[in-house]
Image: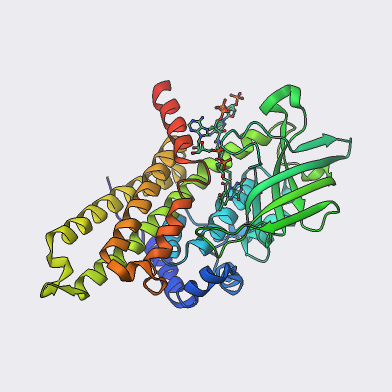
């Protein structure tokens, strides 16, 4: 068993760390406060290859493995989880989905620009009445020969306002249930496509989350991804990898909070000594460190499974459910270690605590991950 990272993986991790410190840290508190999308920073992430990390260079990507992607996601998320969710959706849902299941024409037209971050993508599965219960799609894509007519509403769409390309899941033939669902590429500006108001959120406030409305949107047949009826499988396959990205995000939030808490505990004095010398604080740090290390092993194992052609549905779900719990627990303890300072914005940990919560909700709630895990282990 070899836990050593390759030289390339170390280089990518360090580059992401440097980028996060230099470009994301300044202004992160203000963007959170104003719910401001990190436009300039996301453009730079595209220029540095962070938005199409696993895409082949033939399509404008960086051609890296999933382990490198997970390491970069962790580093970016330590500092700014709003920027990392943009990165996660673009990489593991939109680019990955198009590269693996799109036609050559779709790749040339959309993937090449998405991978370089020239345009941003969104992944649109959730609806007002279809969140966890994702097969209950109410959005319809009616087959009209050479095009589909799309009607319905999508909820909670990350990059909803900033994206140019939207992968939209919709029901074509209700009699076939989930086998009658399709995935369509919808472009911003197609007549009948409207972006709803921005959600006012607890955390990841710099990312833009919107509902989307489709009113008789004509989508050409050539914009369908895969065979007729492949849409639900497409969503599930894409999300299996996406969950590794969100697990890495959760890991980053946890390690960011831990590093801040450790530093603070060595500086802050109470009862004549640094607070880290009080065993109650030292033990908190010991627990945080241990849990983060366990989460990191699960995350990297899932990424390694994906890179090595193993099934990663189970390892990805385990990584996500565990790392997101560690993110929540660690961020809460980091606030506690900071005392009153933990409760104010300038020490960053209150934001990390707010950001941590979403990792237990999106890309399948923790309860849904446990459904995936239990079905997988009971099948054996
Ligand atoms: N890979 C391939 N196919 C899969 C699959 C997988 N991982 N998981 C399920 N399927 C297939 C099944 O094989 C089945 O197809 P067949 O009938 O041909 O065998 C079909 O999908 C339906 O599967 P189930 O019967 O298991 O469906 P279910 O209704 O019990 O639901 C579920 C399964 C896992 C709960 C699924 O609905 C689910 O993942 N829900 C959560 C939705 C989710 O994660 N949404 C995230 C939205 S994106 C997002 O959130 C982005 C962001 O925040 C940034
Ligand atoms: P529900 O499905 O209504 O669940 C409510 C509660 O019931 C949860 O605790 C859930 O775990 C539990 N529950 C439901 N079913 C079961 C069951 N069978 N067993 C046990 N417990 C169950 N979606 C997209 O498609 N694209 C995006 O880009 C995207 N970005 C998002 C960004 C943000 C900030 C947020 C908040 C959400 C985003 N989502 C996105 C939606 C997200 O994936 C859903 O919110 C999530 O899948 C849960 O669906 P729901 O909100 O409808 O909750």
Colouring: rainbow
Q: Going 26% across and 55% down the picture, which residue do you hit?
A: 288
Q: Position of residue 62 (x, y in %)?
A: 55, 61
**Camera-nearest residue between 155 and 200:** 200
Picture quadrant of ligand 2? top right
Q: Position of residue 124 (x, y in %)?
A: 66, 46
Q: Position of residue 379 (x, y in %)?
A: 43, 21
**For the view shown, which residue lies furthest in the right direction?**
145
Q: Indicate whether 313 appears above or below 196.
A: above
**For the view shown, which residue lies furthest in the left direction?**
272
**Camera-nearest residue between 146 and 138:** 138
Q: Position of residue 259 (x, y in %)?
A: 30, 66
Q: Indicate whether 174 appears above or below 287.
A: above
Q: Going 62% across and 52% down the picture, which residue do you hit?
A: 95
**Camera-nearest residue between 23 and 325:** 325
Q: Indicate whether 23 appears above or below 186.
A: below
Confirm whether residue 87 shows in the render: yes
Q: Going 40% across and 42% down the picture, which residue do you hit?
A: 321
In the picture, measured across the screen, residue 117 lies left or right of residue 342, that is: right
In the picture, the quarter occupied by the N terminus is top left
In the picture, the quarter occupied by the C terminus is top left
């Amino acid at each position: 068993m070899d836990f050593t990272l390759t030289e390339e993986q170390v280089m990518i991790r360090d580059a992401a760390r440097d980028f996060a410190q230099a470009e994301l840290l300044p202004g992160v508190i203000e963007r959170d406060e104003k719910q401001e999308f990190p436009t300039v920073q996301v453009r730079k992430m595209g220029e540095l290859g962070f938005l199409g990390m696993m895409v082949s260079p033939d399509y404008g990507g960086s051609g890296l493995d999933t382990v490198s992607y997970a390491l970069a996601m962790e580093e970016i998320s330590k500092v700014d989880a709003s920027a990392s969710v943009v990165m996660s959706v673009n990489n593991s849902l939109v680019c990955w989905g198009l590269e693996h299941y799109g036609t050559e024409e779709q790749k040339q037209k959309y993937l090449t620009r998405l991978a370089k971050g020239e345009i941003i993508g969104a992944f649109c599965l959730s609806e007002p009445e279809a969140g966890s219960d994702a097969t209950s799609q109410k959005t319809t894509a009616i087959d009209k020969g050479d095009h589909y007519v799309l009607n319905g509403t999508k909820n909670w769409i990350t990059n909803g306002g900033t994206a140019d390309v939207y992968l939209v899941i919709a029901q074509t033939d209700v009699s076939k249930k989930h086998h009658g669902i399709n995935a369509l590429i919808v472009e911003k500006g197609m007549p009948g496509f409207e972006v709803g108001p921005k959600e006012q959120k607890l955390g990841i406030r710099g990312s833009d989350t919107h509902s989307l409305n489709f009113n008789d949107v004509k989508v050409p047949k050539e914009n369908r991804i895969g065979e007729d009826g492949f849409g639900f499988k497409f969503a599930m396959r894409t999300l299996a990898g996406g969950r590794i990205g969100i697990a890495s995000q959760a890991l980053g939030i946890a390690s960011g909070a831990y590093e801040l808490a450790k530093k603070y505990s060595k500086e802050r004095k109470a009862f004549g000594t640094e607070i880290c010398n009080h065993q109650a604080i030292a033990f908190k740090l010991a627990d945080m460190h241990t849990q983060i290390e366990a989460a990191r092993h699960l995350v990297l194992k899932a990424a390694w499974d994906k890179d090595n052609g193993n099934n990663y549905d189970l390892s990805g779900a385990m990584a996500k459910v565990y790392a997101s719990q560690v993110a929540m627990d660690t961020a809460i303890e980091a606030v506690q270690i900071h005392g009153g300072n933990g409760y104010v914005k300038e020490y960053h940990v209150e934001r990390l605590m707010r950001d941590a919560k979403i990792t237990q909700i999106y890309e399948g709630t923790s309860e849904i991950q446990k459904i995936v895990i239990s079905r997988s282990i009971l099948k054996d």
